[in-house]
Each structure stands twice: as structure tokens, then as C-alpha cells.
Image (spheres, rainbow, N blue to C red):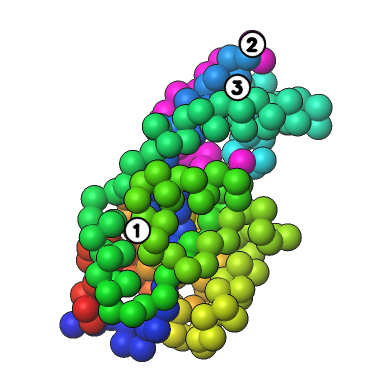
Amino acid sequence: MAHFTDIRALAFDLDGTLVDSAPGLSQAIDHALSDLQLPPPGLALASTWIGNGADVMMTRALTWALGREPHAEEQRDARALFDKYYAQTVEAGSTLFPQVKETLAALQAKGLPLAIVTNKPTPFVAPLLKSLGIDEYFTQIIGGDDVIVKKPHPAAIFLVLGHFGVLPGQLLFVGDSRNDILAAQAAGVPNIGMTFGYNYGEPIATSQPDLTLDSFDELLPAIGL
């Protein structure tokens, strides 16, 4: 039985929802910190820092490595190094979660418009979608540099509502972290939390999404497909 009954468009977070990007992000963080003669955190720890955009992620990494809040110059240097290395690892270090491509194809076949709403720096988003073979499914892509305030602020979701011309109750937002759920709740849109993503080490159910799913293809019956 469908959990949502009047969905006319969908928007998705990217990292941790559609794409397992933690390996590439972790490698870039490790290389950046190593260049600064700081210890590399590794995959398990770096995965808990994903979700608020690259600036916040690198602040968390530096704070861990330095044992204190980083200075502005340290933050600037680390972010520049991260961007340099992530450009080399973003595609090789990212894979689709199971059933993502098949589910997106099924949604598109039903005529449902799809959007990406991510805090990932915008220049990395379109090339990643293309490399993974899912760029064709999305008619709107909003990266972290395309809005003044990132998730958990609802600004980007409001842009999606306007672009698709749907009411809040007709847009389903699918994410994996509390930022996603908070943004959806602030915009008044139905939301799903995926349990397999990156959520700072806490269960996504803690953020009280309308529905939690363990597998991406469970999205189809949730909206009656």
C-alpha cells in the first residue's frame, strides 16, 4: 500500500542517498591533510563528516586533526587542497547504491520530474552524475553553490517547487541525513530517510522522517508504483 498518494515530482540528495561517495571524499581529505603534515582520518571517520558541504566537512576534519578550531588561513588552504584532490578522486571513488539507476528509470518512465538537491560543491555535481550514467534522469540540479544557504535551510527545495510548479504536498524529498529531513520539514514537503547513507553516526529515524527505507527500490511501492 502506498505511503504517499499524490506525489507529482521527486527531489533527491546525492551523497549517501544515490551515491556511495565516501571513498572518494575520504581519499581527498586524507591527501589534503597529509599535504599539511596532519594525520589522515580514514574512511570510517570521514564518513561522519559528510553532508553540510565541503567547507564544513574540511572544518570538521581540521578540528579533529589539529585538536582545535582551525584558523581562516588553515581552512582556506585545506579547502583548496581538498578541491584539488577531489577532482581526481570524485569519479573513481563514487558508486551508485543498489537499485538506484533502475528506480530512477522507473520514475522517469512514469513521467515524474526529478531533481537533485545537494550541498556538494556545484562544479563536481554534473560530471559525477554523467560518469555514473544517471544525468539524463534529472531536469533540475541544485548544488551547494547554487543557493545562498545550504540544507538544512529549505531554500533549494523551494526552488524545486517553483521549477516544477507543484505544491509542497506533491513533492517528495528523499535523503539520508538530518539536514535532508530538516530541510524537507521546513519546506513542508513529504520526506523519506534512507538508512544506508551518512548521518553523522546516528540513525536517520532520529530525525523523524515521514518514512524510512532500507533499500532504494522500496521507493516505488511507497508512492504506489
Report the residue marked by disc 1: 194
Secondary structure found at label 1? strand
Tag 3 or tag 2, which sits nearer the N-term?
3
Label 1 packing within 10 angstroms: few (<14), some (14-19), many (20+): many
Q: Is any part of residue 199 visible from this angle?
A: no
Q: Are marks 2 and 3 in contact (CB under 8 Å)?
A: no
Q: Where, by quadrant of the figure, is residue 23 drawn?
A: top left
- Residue that lies at the very extreme toward the left in this rendered image: 1
Is residue 32 inside the magenta stretch? Answer: no
- In three-dimensional space, the C-alpha distance between marks 2 and 3, rounded to whole angstroms, equals 9 Å
Q: Measuring 62% from the left and 53% from the top, which residue is drawn there?
A: 144
Q: Measuring 57% from the left and 78% from the top, which residue is drawn there?
A: 163
Q: Where, by quadrant of the figure, is residue 173 drawn?
A: bottom left
Q: Amino acid at mark 1?
A: Met
- Residue that lies at the very extreme toward the top in this rendered image: 37
Q: Amino acid at mark 2?
A: Gln
Tag 3 or tag 1, which sits nearer the N-term?
3
Quadrant containing the N terminus is bottom left
Magenta segment, which residues?
36-54
Mark 1 or 3: in front is 3
Q: Looking at the rendered structure, which numbered label has been put on residue 37? A: 2
Question: Is residue 114 found left or right of 49 in the rendered image?
Answer: left
Is residue 48 inside the magenta stretch? Answer: yes
Q: Measuring 61% from the left and 73% from the top, which residue is drawn there?
A: 159
